[in-house]
Image (spheres, rainbow, N blue to C red):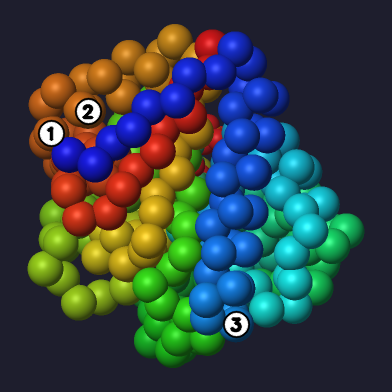
Amino acid sequence: MAVQERQFSSPSEAAAALADAVSASLATALAARERASLVVSGGRSPIGFFQCLCDAELDWSQVWITLADERWVPDDHPDSNAALLRQHLLQGAAAAAHFVPLWNGAATPAAAIAERTAALAQLPQPFDSVVLGMGEDGHTASLFPGAPGLAAALDPAGTALLAAIDPPAAPHPRLSLTLKALLGCRHIHLPLAGASKRAVYARALAQCDPLQLPISAVLCQSGVPVTVYLAP
Ligand SMILES: O=C(O)[C@H](O)[C@@H](O)[C@H](O)[C@H](O)COP(=O)(O)O
């Protein structure tokens, strides 16, 4: 396993440390390769991290950003992850970054896969950093337990970068990066706050059964280093 744990006394301390680590990974990438890439998750918990990261002193005009997953709603909908990013990350210095959204206005996530797969080629790959989240059902990105197509989206030998997912118990159809795409990176960061998420994380590490707790697919692999930022 390639998991390193870091403990923090509050979610805001964890968010600041995560922003420092991601900005250092982007600075290293820019020094070595001219362009850098970053994949981030939506949901509620990354807002503090986004607000710290957007002020980082980087040549943001050479940074390409996309999402680990998107809810299939217009990009001005309150549940849109793209809207969240525009509001909290693509601000200040980071407004100069190139954002490659997953939502493209197609009727369904499945109908968007071919065109958005081509769009993802704009990002330098492997991605420099992937920042994931985790739900209390063990989903990460939009790889939800019990969703039709989950096994294919979790296949490390699969070739697809995107999967259309209908979460059994969460709102909106989704377009998600597959496990293959998420692992195509130099480093994965996973911030986790609260006792319930910590308990799910401990089970996922112990059981390593991705169909039950999809985050296990990230935690129980050894190809890509994973840093977990734990906060109360
Ligand atoms: O669009 C999404 O819903 C996400 O990308 C998802 O994978 C998220 O990271 C987790 O559900 C955690 O969400 P919270 O941060 O809201 O707890």
Element under label 3? Answer: loop
Quarter where residue 38 is shown: bottom right
Q: Is residue 178 visible?
A: no
Verify CB contact (< 8 Å) between mark 1 and mark 3. Answer: no
Image-based side of 190 in relation to 178, left or right? right
Q: Position of residue 69 (x, y in %)?
A: 47, 58
Give the residue at mark 3. Answer: 34
Which residue is tagged 1? 208
Number of numbered discs visible in the structure rendering: 3
Residue at 37 percent across and 64 percent down: it is 185
Q: Secondary structure at mark 1?
A: loop
Instruction: Indicate which disc residue 204 carries.
Output: 2
Q: Quadrant of residue 118?
A: bottom left
Question: Along the polypeptide, which appears first: circle 2 or circle 3?
Answer: 3
Return the disc, 1 or 3, that comes first in the chain's sequence: 3
Determine the residue positioned at 38% across, 17% down: 198
Quick one: quadrant of the N terminus? top left
User: Which mark is nearer the camera, 2 or 3?
Assistant: 3
Q: Is residue 182 above or below residue 168?
A: below
Q: Position of residue 5 (x, y in %)?
A: 38, 27
